[in-house]
Image (cartoon, grey):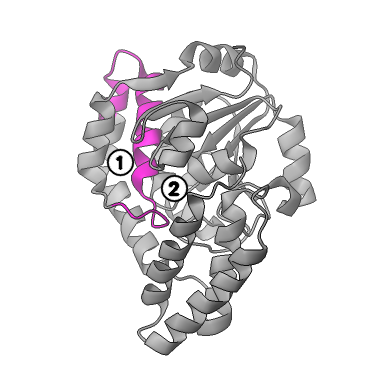
Amino acid sequence: MKTFLDCIPCFVKQALRAGRTASRNEAEIKALLDRIGRRIESISLEHSPPEMGLIIYDEIRKITGVEDLYEKEKKEHIAEALRLYPKMVRARDSSADPLLTAIRMAIAGNVIDLGMEKNFHIEDDLQSVLEQEFALCDIADFKRVLAAAEHILYLGDNAGESVFDRILIEVLGKPVVYAVRGRAIINDVTREDALASGLGGVAEIISSGSPAPATILKYCNEDFLERFNKADMIISKGQGNYEGLSETDRPVFFLLKAKCPVIARDIGVEEDDIVLKYALKKQ
């Protein structure tokens, strides 16, 4: 997905929020915004929005020296999700369709996003999504592809949300490779976060190599690219991964909550809708 003009004010707001998280020095934050502004001038609208996120957090690292800006928040989100985990498992297993319920739960976890200017409450949002109708739901394709799949690649998004991913992986009934970010960026899931979420017991954890808040193939390592091209089912969580892979010709299922109006418009749904979209769905 390309960058739209509507994305540019969001880049600046995100830089300001992140800057204030990293530093209380107003001059330091102003210097950050100045540098971001100069780099926005040179970025092509043909690039995907997460590539701007990569620039923002690279500048924050340079100015503040902070490597994992949201380390504390990620640990809190994982702990809160793990507290809810037994309740979620009971609800999943007692439902009429455990797989679809687990997909809803995985999407509910997508609200845990510190890159967005939206508040969230994990437990309340979980209940809300469990009751919400899908705007787009390719569940028949999901079940059909899953039944035949031998190589499943699951693309993680945010820490805390990773516990909700575990809820889904547990009912897929097949070996799964779980891909995390190449390094800490925003509150995206890293290997350490995935292990803390309990994913080591249900999936093989690998790094995509992507330093951006998305799976952007040109930044990914060879091991990931080999697995991506070999996979006969790819489950992609979140908006960033959608932005990076929306034009793919691989068998990708996008699971997300459309928190951004630009992304909602690109998918063809309304803001705050929940989506299970098959990339290869015939129109």
Give the vertical position of 96 relative to 265 (above or below): above
Q: Quick one: 21 or 40, which is closer to the camera?
A: 40
Circle 2 packing at 10 Å, graded few (<14), some (14-19), many (20+), is some
Tell me the magenta residue range. 90-118
Q: Give the quarter of the image for residue 251.
A: top right
Q: Position of residue 112 (x, y in %)?
A: 36, 49
Q: Position of residue 235 (x, y in %)?
A: 56, 32
| Distance from the alpha carbon under mark 2 to that under mark 1 | 10 Å
Question: Which residue does the image show at 44% across and 46% down from the upper left?
Answer: 162
**Quadrant the C terminus occupies:** top right
Q: Position of residue 166 (x, y in %)?
A: 44, 39
Question: Which residue does the image show at 35% across and 84% down from the upper left?
Answer: 24
User: In the image, is residue 113 part of the stretch drawn in magenta?
Assistant: yes
Q: Marks 2 and 1: CB-CB under 8 Å?
A: yes
User: In the image, is residue 206 part of the stretch drawn in magenta?
Assistant: no
> What is the three-letter code of the residue carrying label 1?
Tyr
**Which residue does the numbered mark 2 point to in the structure image?**
198
Tell me how many marks there are.
Answer: 2
**What is the magenta segment's predominant secondary structure?**
helix
Secondary structure, mark 1, is helix
**Which residue does the numbered mark 1 point to in the structure image?**
85
Q: Give the quarter of the image for residue 273.
A: top left
First-in-chain label (2 vs 1): 1
